[in-house]
Image (tube, helix red, strand yellow):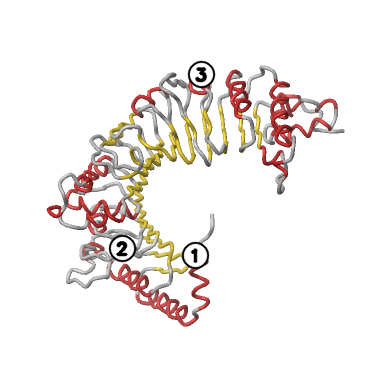
């Protein structure tokens, strides 16, 4: 006896909901009891690449894409007006945009709560206006390699139940200011946007409900530095922010923040100007305002885990004297670059009095006379002073290249971090291959690590980077 066929329809529908719609449709040939049962499944998953069995040139054959679009039409027609929970669609150029929008409108009328769209149209995609006024959407995810046109002033969006909005695309085109747009999502908890540009030079992100916020911005109109960016998000727990440096951050309200990832992009020319005395800069130079980034740091000072990009670290060198104390930070992640300096590192370590572990994504950096005593690039009498006051117990170094400069830096850490107990050094496959081609250097590095373990109280391990 067929045990599956003996199960109630609702149970079999639940089983089919874990399959793609194409896979579920194949069960209709099993018996009469399975015929069209897939059409009752409340979760629909359409993928044109899977449907077409990808092979060279097949997508361009006459009728192939039409068969996919016909399949979607048929399934939606078979389901009639039955409620739908989740609708997932992946398609590329060649699929008719008007039919795409019709499918979206159909599932919206059937009270869909979870909408996941991956649409790669060469010229971008205009979403139907019905999408912006859905009273049932809870989760909305859009992904594209081109772009998405999001909303218009002609119709103010309002999605009263939306909790998660995730847009990952080459460009987000929106003609509504952020402070006018966010009230359209009164219960929004998660907002992920990449890539977007600010509509105006001064913007405010304000929401009492958002707990996770990730914005990858490209500045204001044609990659210009914004004048003013504010964040009034008192419930925020996670903050990921990538943008050109703004001239001011007048309001940053994030008192419950746990994790922050900050990338403040600057050009090489701006970095050169940042490193010269202020009195040598022309009046009106935008970098004169970059020191206001301290207002952003003040707003996130309650954070427990702090990630800083190499550009961000360079910008922070402008506000070392006013840097806040991060009493709650236990984990610090620093991304390094050979063209960016560590001038802010001494004060950053001193101002994290309860730091437990540091992750360095590379330890090669631009050497200046203001690196302080964190590195051993320049000899100084107060060598290691900042490290001596830091309570860090674990250091992880990623992107290790196997150079003597890096080894001397590691030796410096071992000498001056007083509480250090564990150090893990990760090499990628390229660096491992280089060491294999230079066995003498490999023996020297391994010998130095063995010596580190003998003379230090810290356990030092050289490891291979694991791909995730």
- Pointer 1 local density, CA inside 10 Å: few below 14, some 14–19, many at least 20: some
Q: Mark 2 sits on what residue?
A: 419
> What whole-number distance in Å separates the C-alpha atoms at marks 2 and 1?
28 Å
Sooner in the amino-acid sequence: mark 2 or mark 1: 2
Where residue 102 appears, as percent x and y from the top left, is: 61, 23
Q: Nearer the viewer, mark 2 or mark 3?
A: 3
Q: Mark 1 sits on what residue?
A: 428
Image quarter where the C terminus lies is bottom right
Instruction: Tally the numbered discs.
Output: 3
Sooner in the amino-acid sequence: mark 2 or mark 3: 3
Question: Residue at coordinates 50% horizontally, 81% vertically from top-left?
Answer: 439
Q: Mark 3 sits on what residue?
A: 135
- Pointer 3 local density, CA inside 10 Å: few below 14, some 14–19, many at least 20: some
Quadrant in which residue 99 is drawn = top right
Where residue 275 appears, as percent x and y from the top left, is: 21, 57
Looking at the image, which residue sits at the far left? 279
- Pointer 2 local density, CA inside 10 Å: few below 14, some 14–19, many at least 20: some
Element assignment for label 2: loop
- 226 versus 97 height, above or below: below
Question: Residue at coordinates 30% horizontally, 64% vertically from top-left?
Answer: 366
Element assignment for label 3: loop
Question: Residue at coordinates 36% horizontally, 70% vertically from top-left?
Answer: 406
Where residue 11 appears, as percent x and y from the top left, is: 72, 28
């Amino acid at each position: 006896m067929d045990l599956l066929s003996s199960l109630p329809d609702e149970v079999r529908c639940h089983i089919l909901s874990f399959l793609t719609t194409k896979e579920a449709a194949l069960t209709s040939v099993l018996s009469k009891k399975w015929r069209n049962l897939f059409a009752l499944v409340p979760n629909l998953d359409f993928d044109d690449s899977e449907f077409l069995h990808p092979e060279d040139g097949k997508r361009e054959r006459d009728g192939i894409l039409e068969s996919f679009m016909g399949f979607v039409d048929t399934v939606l027609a078979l389901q009639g007006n039955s409620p739908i929970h989740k609708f997932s669609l992946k398609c590329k150029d060649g699929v008719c945009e008007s039919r795409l929008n019709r499918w979206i409108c159909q599932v919206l009328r059937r009270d869909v709560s979870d909408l996941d769209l991956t649409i790669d149209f060469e010229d971008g995609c205009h979403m139907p206006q019905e999408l912006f006024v859905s009273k049932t959407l809870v989760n909305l995810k859009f992904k594209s390699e081109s772009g998405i046109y999001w909303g218009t002033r002609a119709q103010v969006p309002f999605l009263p139940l939306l909790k998660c909005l995730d847009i990952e695309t080459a460009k987000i085109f929106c003609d509504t200011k952020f402070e006018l747009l966010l009230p359209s999502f009164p219960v929004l908890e998660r907002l992920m946007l990449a890539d977007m540009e600010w509509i105006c030079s001064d913007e405010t992100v304000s929401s009492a409900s958002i707990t996770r916020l990730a914005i990858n911005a490209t500045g204001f109109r044609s990659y210009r530095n914004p004048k003013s960016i504010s964040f009034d998000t008192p419930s925020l727990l996670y903050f990921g922010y990538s943008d050109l440096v703004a001239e001011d951050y007048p309001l940053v309200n994030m008192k419950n923040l746990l994790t922050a990832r900050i990338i403040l992009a600057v050009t090489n020319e701006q970095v050169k100007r940042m490193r010269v005395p202020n009195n040598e800069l022309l009046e009106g130079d935008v970098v004169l305002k970059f020191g206001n980034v301290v207002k952003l740091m003040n707003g996130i000072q309650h954070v427990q885990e702090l990630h800083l990009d190499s550009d961000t670290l360079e910008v922070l060198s402008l506000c070392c004297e006013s840097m806040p104390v991060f009493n709650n930070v236990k984990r610090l992640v620093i991304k390094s670059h050979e063209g960016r300096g560590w001038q802010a590192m001494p004060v950053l370590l001193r101002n994290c009095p309860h730091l437990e572990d540091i992750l360095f994504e590379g330890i090669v950096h631009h050497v200046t006379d203001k690196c302080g005593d964190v590195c051993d690039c320049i000899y100084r009498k107060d060598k290691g002073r900042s490290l001596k006051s830091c309570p860090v117990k674990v250091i992880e170094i990623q992107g290790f290249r196997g150079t003597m400069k890096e080894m001397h830096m590691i030796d410096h850490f071992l000498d001056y971090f007083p509480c250090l107990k564990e150090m893990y050094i990760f090499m990628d496959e390229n660096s491992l291959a280089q060491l294999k081609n230079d066995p003498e250097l490999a023996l020297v590095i391994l010998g130095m690590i063995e010596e580190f373990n003998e003379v230090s109280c810290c356990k030092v391990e050289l490891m291979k980077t694991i791909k995730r």
